[in-house]
Image: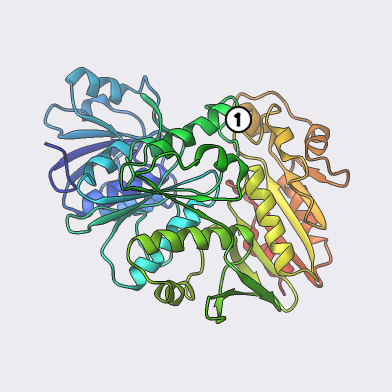
Amino acid sequence: MPPTPTALHRLHLIAIGGSIMHNLALALHRRAAQVTGSDDEIFEPAHGRLATAGILPPSEGWFPEKITADLDAVIVGMHARADNPELLRAQELGLRIYSFPEFIYEASRDKQRVVIGGSHGKTSITSLILHVLRHHGRKFDYAVGAQLEGFDLMVQLTEEAPIIIIEGDEYLSSPIDRRPKFHLYQHHIGVISGISWDHINVFPTEENYREQFRIFAEMTPKAGVLIYDRDDEQVQLVSVPTDPDVTYIGYGPHEHVVRDGKTFLLTKKDDEIPIQIFGDHNLRNISAAKEVCKQLGIKGKDFFEALATFKGAARRLELVRTGHDSVVYKDFAHAPSKLKATAAALKKQFPKRRLVACLELHTFSSLNPAFLPQYAHTFDAPDVAIVYFNPQVLAHKRLPDLLPEQVAAAFQRPDLRVFTDSRALAAFLHEQNWADANLLMMSSGTFDGLDLAKLAEVVAK
């Protein structure tokens, strides 16, 4: 019998401290399941949230004695290794073992599944859909990779919701399941927002990476819907309308106008709808979300009504501070396509202001010398372009040493400033003239503890 959020009562999560895993733990705990877990590192906000719920592991580490025959299931996160002692014990006992995507699928077998995939934009599109559905009082479940305003958890599993909205990550499902997560959800409505080679440690070639999206597209079932960015060349290669039983819907950026630093959507009735997000990539995300919502029965006028109050997903072109003639934004961008889109968006939104933009190379791909050439000319939009990386992170990821000269050459921008000391970076930024200038900080990390709030005070006086 397939499990449901209430069918399994005793669950143990290996790597419970992960961003999405601790949210799953909290969602299951909310459904009155008996939840335990382990992890070798648990940071905030996971630590505090698990503690408040009373399910924080007593101590960090792996404890195979926690794995007992009376557990209904074990859920293993990607952070764990294949030789994890708790995982080995679960296999020895023959327990039911799930990856995160396997469990989400099993828990939503009887629901309509909407899966948003893509190298970029999937979090924002998912967030937009959730915001619109909630605004109109629709019942839905979800699994999304970013904290959203108005949602206390990133995962919700209920019995009554007829649909589930899932952010479909292309990364591996678990240490013992090398399939991409979004292959396991078995979507009814699928979205491919864009394809730009990433995760070089798992997908060594661009062709191999693109193949995962072709598989996803071809998994669209009879009477299913595939929604895709019609202008993305890589997406075009995998989203060719070949199945007469599938509905294919291509989309582009929503019609709009930018005036005085504000973006307005244009409707078929020539109305102007003010929105709080901006940039070509977000205008494409809006179009994708609108097509999904249409499939779910949300009319255009109702979509626009809800969109007016959407502020964006956390860390996705997120406003930090506004001043008289300056703004400070932070963004999760780190992949080449995200970097290019985000920097260009802010420059277009405020064309008369100087843009100072700083990128932290933090992921395995971004720090890999073999991947760095992918950044060529992706950082041309800012007036001042800065790249930061910490040599210690290279050592931790077991990557070869990287010289600032290599980084500058890869970006193909002669005036690129490269820093390897966060204190020197902070000093440089504090010394800039911030009159009629904006600051954009982009990273999946923290610039090694740089105090962005303090810096923002200086920039946006």
Residue ID for mark 1: 206
Q: Is residue 147 visible?
A: no
Question: Residue sitting at 74 percent across and 43 percent down?
Answer: 421
Q: Is residue 131 visible?
A: yes
For label 1, count other residues whose C-alpha is less than 10 Å away and answer few (under 14), some (14-19) or many (20+).
Answer: some
State whether residue 407 is above or below residue 160: above
Residue 100 location (% of width, % of height): 33, 38
The answer to whether 142 appears left or right of 317 in the picture is: left
Decide which of 24, 124 is in the foreground and name it.
124
State whether residue 416 is above or below residue 128: above
Quadrant where the N terminus is found in the figure = top left
Question: Residue sitting at 60 percent across and 69 percent down?
Answer: 255
Colour basis: rainbow
Q: Which amino acid, by three-letter code, is at mark 1?
A: Glu
Decide which of 426, 407 is in the foreground and name it.
407
Decide which of 419, 140 is in the foreground and name it.
140
Element marked by disc 1: helix
The answer to whether 37 appears left or right of 445 in the picture is: left
State whether residue 176 is above or below residue 169: above
The answer to whether 135 appears left or right of 55 in the picture is: right
Decide which of 63, 335 is in the foreground and name it.
335
Quadrant where the C terminus is found in the figure = bottom right
Residue 387 location (% of width, % of height): 74, 45
Marks counted in the figure total 1
